[in-house]
Each structure stands twice: as structure tokens, then as C-alpha cells.
Image (cartoon, rainbow, N blue to C red):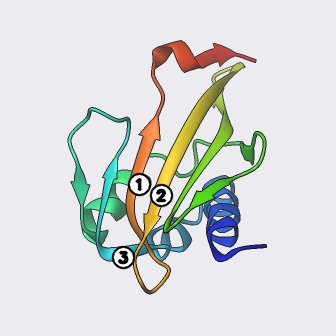
Amino acid sequence: MSQASNVVAAYLAALQAADLEGIVGLYAEDATIEDPVGSDLVVGQAAIRAFYAKAVGTIEQAYLVGSTRESSNEVAFAFELIIPMGDNKMVMDIIDVFSFNGDGKIQTMRAFWGKANMRPL
């Protein structure tokens, strides 16, 4: 498995396990997040920690849909999140693109999804 695929696997496992520090540790100190694409950038590990603190614990499952696609220092991957919503569950279909710095840390994360990519389970 490539380094990029290892990071993707660690990211999804940390999301599912509600491991906030595990997620933040994958990012460079000056990393940026655009989630969803078109929203304001989240810049730096402190802001990234605050961003993910809102999400961890709300995700029941996080898993790949298909394989990762790698090119140069970037990886794209489709995945689904299962999120409990009261007595129901919601599925979110997402495509993330990570770029990596020279240390193998996530430098940029862009998440492609919108309301049309959410459906009841």
C-alpha cells in the first residue's frame, strides 16, 4: 500500500473512531481545508482541530467506495459516511482530494459534496 493510501486509511479510521488527535496529526502545521469546496478555508492545525471537533463522534461509519487515485503528491478518493440522525441514518457521498507536503503530511484537503450527496439510509 502506498503512503497516500495509508494516510487515507488512517484518516477514515480516525473519523470512524472519533480520534480527533489522530485526524489532526495527519495534517501539516499550516495545512488548509476547504470542506465543502467553495466554503471558507480552514487554515492551520488549531483551526483544523476546531473544525473536526464538531464532526467527531457524529460518524458511525466511514469507508472507501472504490480505490484511491494517486498522481504526483495528491490522492483523490470517494467515500461514504454513515451519520445517525435520531432514529434514522444519513449517508453522505464525498470525494476528498489531499495534497501532501515533503514530510507526507496533508497540506491541503478539498471535499467535494453538497446536499444532493446526502440521502437516508
Mark 3 residue type: Ala
Mark 1 residue type: Met
Q: Quadrant of the N terminus?
A: bottom right
Residue holding disc 2: 98
Rendered position, 88 above or below 40: above
Q: Residue 89, labelled with which disc? A: none
Q: Looking at the image, which residue is at 45% across and 41% down?
A: 111
Compare marks 3 and 1 and give the one earlier in the sequence. 3
Q: Dots 3 and 1: beta carbons under 8 Å?
A: no
Q: CA distance from mark 3 to mark 2?
A: 12 Å
Residue 107 placement: quadrant = bottom left
Percent position of residue 87, x then y? 71, 19
Q: CA distance from mark 2 to mark 1?
A: 5 Å
Q: Residues within 10 Å of mark 3 (few under 14, many from 20)?
A: some
29 sits left or right of 78 in the view: left
Compare marks 2 and 1 and give the one earlier in the sequence. 2
Residue holding disc 3: 28
Residue holding disc 1: 109
52 sits left or right of 119 in the view: left
In terms of secondary structure, where does tag 2 sit? strand
Rendered position, 39 above or below 101: above
The furthest residue to the front: 72
